[in-house]
Amino acid sequence: MKFSVVTFGCRVNQADSLALEEGLRARGAEPAPSAEADIIIVNSCSVTCTADQGARQAVRRASRDNPRARVVVTGCYATRSPEDVKALGVARVVPNDAKDSLADVLADELPAGEWTTRERFSDEGEGPCGLKLGPGAAGRTAFTLRVQTGCDQRCSYCIIPFTRGRSTSRPLEDLGKAIDRACAAGYREITLTGVHLGAYGRDLHPRRSLAELLGLVAALPHDVLFRLGSLEPMDCGDDVVEIVAGSPRFAPVFHLPLQHASPRMLQAMRRPYTPEYYSALTRRIRARIAGAAIGSDIIVGFPGESSGDFDSLRSFLESSTLTQLHVFPYSDRPGTEASGMGGRVDGVAVRERARLIREIGRSLTRRFIETQLGRTHAALVIDDGCSAVTRNGLKVGLVVPQTRNDWVSVRLRQSGDALVGDVV
């Protein structure tokens, strides 16, 4: 049996797809391009209306290009709007809370002769030989490990708490074993991710914390670099910053979603911090970790956003030390608190505001790169060996191709618009 997995959205979805692919391969299924697959699984996102549209287009494309394949849709869009997905004529719609057992379900539905084995494996692919998806499989060099899913934080614009459910953490012991398997499979870099990563352990008995998880990771003997997924500002306390600063196991990279810098907008979004708190947090990180990259998410055009609110956001970002911005025009999600708010911003104004903030983001990135030119960084070789990613998250071109999944030392320089790493 041949399968193809098409993934949209966040790193949690990427981790889910990796586990699903491993579960299918462990049962003898073979990965294949969508046009040649017997089963096509679309792991959908629903964070914006554009994400919904992307999932629908992927389903229609799969059905058109490979009409004999069974199309299965899972993920957040399948959870939020199952009837809309069913109307696309798919074989099965699987909500997020049943995603981890999807490989078992598919194995049970198909004739035994189509599978090499029908043994049961965990959702992280634990089988007799451990992980079968080593570096390079499905175009990946790094491993993404989901440590937590769900969210109890009710931001007024976000549908994800409704599609992922309450916060649920994996026990420390399970995560230690999953990391052991990933390292044994050859991975040199692992990203720890979750829907609400900072809430890790609060639901466990006994209660745990993200700092405890990071302490466990820092003490592991493996020669591997860990990156943190997106971390809410209120969850990035001094304990987390100190652990990252004090251990070579962690990449000096933080992604801290700001969303807005107007106190009025933050309150309307139900974001539990102030612009002053966020500024102080980024200053603490900079003081402790030289060369740290700090990225952020920004929403423009939230209901009620005035020109004064936008000016506050623009001024805050221009004077910040952030290094990368992901900019999202507000997308209405029916069922959220924000969906019922008045004061909608004109679409033309939203697009112009997004353009202006993206330009600020490009300027911040250029400024950060300039501070790194001439410096030497450890970098992991990715893709076809012609590029690498530094510990602090900069993707560089390699003049001389290297072996994929190797760590190399590179000195950074600019070549036209390209960032280049000379191996030293």
Image (tube, rainbow, N blue to C red):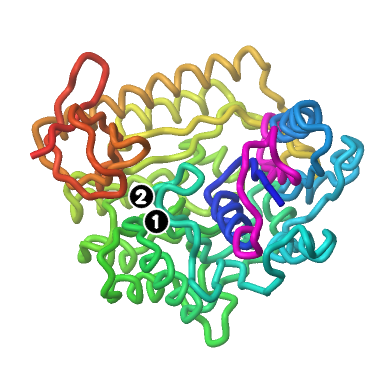
Q: Is residue 365 left or right of residue 325?
A: left
The range drawn in magenta is: 24-51
Q: Is residue 73 left or right of residue 423?
A: right
Q: Percent position (x, y) of residue 335?
A: 80, 45
User: Is residue 336 visible to the viewer in this orientation of the structure?
Assistant: no
What's the mark number on residue 228?
1
Query: Is the residue 227 above or below the residue 372 in the image?
Result: below
Q: Nearer the viewer, residue 349 or 253?
A: 253
Q: Is residue 372 left or right of residue 131?
A: left
Say what amino acid the circle numbered 2 marks. Answer: Phe
Q: Percent position (x, y) of residue 131?
A: 49, 65
On the image, numbered disc 2 is attached to which residue?
A: 254
Query: Is the residue 65 above or below the residue 334 in the image?
Result: above
Instruction: Specify whether residue 39 is painted magenta.
Output: yes
In terms of image quadrants, where is residue 350? Answer: top right
The outermost residue toward the bottom is: 206
What's the mark number on residue 307?
none
Determine whether label 2 and label 1 are within 8 Å by CB.
Answer: yes
Q: Quadrant of the C terminus?
A: top left
